[in-house]
Amino acid sequence: MKHRQPLPPDMFDELCPSSLVPFRFGDKWAALILRCLEGGPRRFSELRVPLHRVTPKVLTQSLRRLERDGLVSRAVHADPRPGVEYALTPLGRSMLEPMDAACAWAAEHWDELIDAREQYTAP
């Protein structure tokens, strides 16, 4: 396995524009998983670093749904270290551009989205 940069633990901090996008790509965590896999295959333990707010059970369920939908592939490796790696398929990689557009939209409308949410929850 070639060396790759670790995923940063604060990759999806609480103020990430992706949390404000009012529509989802798959389930709640799917877009974040796809973003983690953008740079190449990752092991489950690597995904857990930036996705620390996701329980292992929910992360597994999300990965299975992405695999079922053809967006992520799962490869079992016996050597040199036994384990499973997840990677974007060509179909999954094609989702990155629409996700970029959605994140750019959320960043552009950040203040409006925050105001709307605050007004909705105001008494």
Image (cartoon, helix red, strand yellow):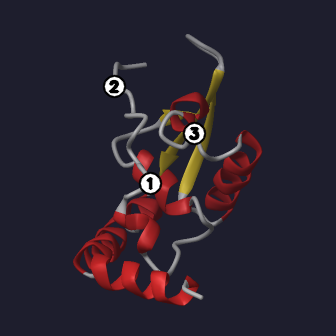
Pinpoint residue 67: horizontal percent, then vertical percent: 64, 56
**Residues under numbered marks 1 and 3 in contact, where contact means CB atoms less than 8 Å apart:** no
- Choose the circle earlier in sequence order: 1 or 2: 2
Pinpoint residue 24: horizontal percent, then vertical percent: 53, 75
Q: Work out how far the residue at label 2 is from the one at label 3, CA to CA, in angstroms.
A: 20 Å
Q: Nearer the viewer, mark 1 or mark 2?
A: 1
Q: Nearer the viewer, mark 2 or mark 3?
A: 3
**Are there few (<14), some (14-19), or many (20+) residues within 10 Å of tag 2?**
few
Q: Is residue 74 above or below residue 23?
A: above
According to the picture, the residue beneath numbered tag 2 turns out to be 4
Q: Nearer the viewer, residue 71 or 20?
A: 20
Q: Image point 43% across, 76% down: which residue?
A: 21
Disc 2, SS: loop
Q: Would you say 31 lies left or right of 106 here?
A: right
Q: Is residue 112 above or below residue 100?
A: below
Q: Image point 64% across, 51% down: which residue?
A: 63
Disc 1, SS: loop
According to the picture, the residue beneath numbered tag 1 turns out to be 14
Pinpoint residue 81: horizontal percent, then vertical percent: 59, 13
According to the picture, the residue beneath numbered tag 3 turns out to be 52
Residue 79 image-quadrant placement: top right
**Are there few (<14), some (14-19), or many (20+) residues within 10 Å of tag 1?**
few
